[in-house]
Image (cartoon, rainbow, N blue to C red):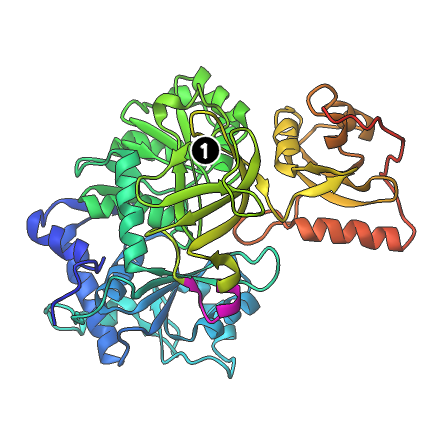
Amino acid sequence: MERNSMNVGQWISKWSAIRPEKIALYSDGRPFSYRAINDQSNKVALLLNGLRIGKGDRVGVLLRNSHEYIEIYFALSRMGAILVPLNWRLVDSEVEFILRDSGVSALFFGSEFAQLVDTVRKAETLTIKAFVCIGDGAPQWAMGYEEALQSQPEASAPFPADAGGEDANIIMYTSGTTGIPKGAVLSHRKTFYNVLNANIFYGLTHDDIMLIPRALFHSGGLLVEALPMLYKGGTIVMQKRFRPAEILKAIETYKVTVAEPPATTLRIILEQCDIGQYNLNSVRCWYTGGERVPPSLIKDYKERGITISQIYGQTETSTIAWLPVTEAHRKLGSVGIPVFHGEVRVVDEAGLEVRPGEVGEIVVSGCITMSGYWGKPELTEETIRDGWLHTGDLALVDEEGFLYVVDRKKDMFISGGENVYPAEIEKVYLENPKVLNVAVVGVPDEKWGEVGMLSIVLRDGETMTDEEALAFCEGKLARYKMPKVVKFLPELPMTAAQKIKRRELREAYVKGLSEGSKAGCHGEDRPQDKS
């Protein structure tokens, strides 16, 4: 049978033949050529083959960003096995759930996570055949990564003739903000077209060098940053952990040309670092995405001579839209236009496209969508209807076709008959120099049905009263959008993927009401202003 040409595992082996000595990646400062990564990847595949792990088998990886992560990923891809990335911020019960739900057969883990894995491996419901430890001090119940690879012969890796295309490549679990985590099944086909999209909007060449500040267990780190660069034959720069100043130093040292840090990281860099001390002129395009991006952040960087543009996507689709760098300031607040490969629409409840300026749900179709949720056919049918994946994200489109994400559909609440989008309110408060973080959720109200509850985390040393907090949005928001409840918190409850646990905030308030506590609630009447 002819080999499937859409097997992403071929990328490293082909570049190893074309440009063997080209640096594929820097891992904690160490350079690794395409030949070196390919050779190690072959050995990983041979190791797994010897453990009778092959096409369709799931393999977990609990590891910080490193060259080993890339070696393992490409080995699994060329074999037709399936990567299950594990978020190292998860607790043992969460890791156990994912391993059990996906039916992982082998687990690669960093030595710093040995205690967690030791706890998890004792669960009777797991089906793991082998544990492989990366780093010093492998426990007795696990194989050492380097030792295991050294025992493998110098040979090409097993490569099933029919692996690729619609075969599963990755099962990437979402953070589970609304309940049990679910595994999005991402095929070789989806990975390939997402990489093509990234190559287009980044304008990549094999001479580019990309910084990888995001974790590889996330779609952003693996599919939006690392893989597009390795497909193109360029170079990636990563560390197990980047501190803000280290990001700037890495850009200067390696002459990084493309950078896509999270908005939170960009904000911390401004707070903790003097950007002017670093030579960042090598970067030809800066992007950010994956979370709320306050317009003030883009403006702050513009004042420092740096243009940052936005991209938008989700685990189930990877990148959906991108904002051309040339439009970063003219279309401030927009996430851009749909990617080249894939169909994107904004529709109303009846499935009809909304008119410019109207709010609807973003739906996606075509080659960039997931195959479905692992083991959850009902949820898959609920999410993918008539060939369109419903993102749950609300947006509007302007007259020129640029998308503006308004909020999550499930986060929207109705106050006095009007739709209120928390993200719109949060953007206003993130402009306040005293505010470090903020979240808005709808909570019960006898008069209006629901009103907004504002949870604020202040910056160190700052103070603010309830009245001051509520007054800040006067004149910036319509009256019906203005929050009526204020809570000051030391930190917001976050998922392992650093998403706000809005349901937890709402439930805590409702519980307080049931116990007769309405502290912090401002119940004064307000005009029914529909502006």
Query: Percent position (x, y) of residue 411?
Result: 64, 46
Q: Residue furthest bottom?
A: 124
Magenta segment: 372-380
Tell me the quadrant of the picture where the N terminus can be found.
Answer: bottom left
At which x and y percent is residue 256? 28, 33
Q: Position of residue 364 (x, y in %)?
A: 42, 48
Q: Which residue is mark 1?
A: 335
- Say which amino acid is labelled 1: Val
Magenta stretch: includes residue 377 = yes
Identify the residue at the far right of this view: 516
The 10 Å Cα crowd at callout 1, few under 14, some 14 to 19, many 20 or more, is many
Q: Nearer the viewer, residue 85 or 339?
A: 339
Residue visible at 36% across and 52% down in the picture:
65
**Position of 494 relative to 146 (above/below):** above
Element type at mark 1: loop
Q: Is 61 placed above or below 258 here?
A: below
Would residue 281 be found to the left or right of residue 317 on screen?
Answer: left
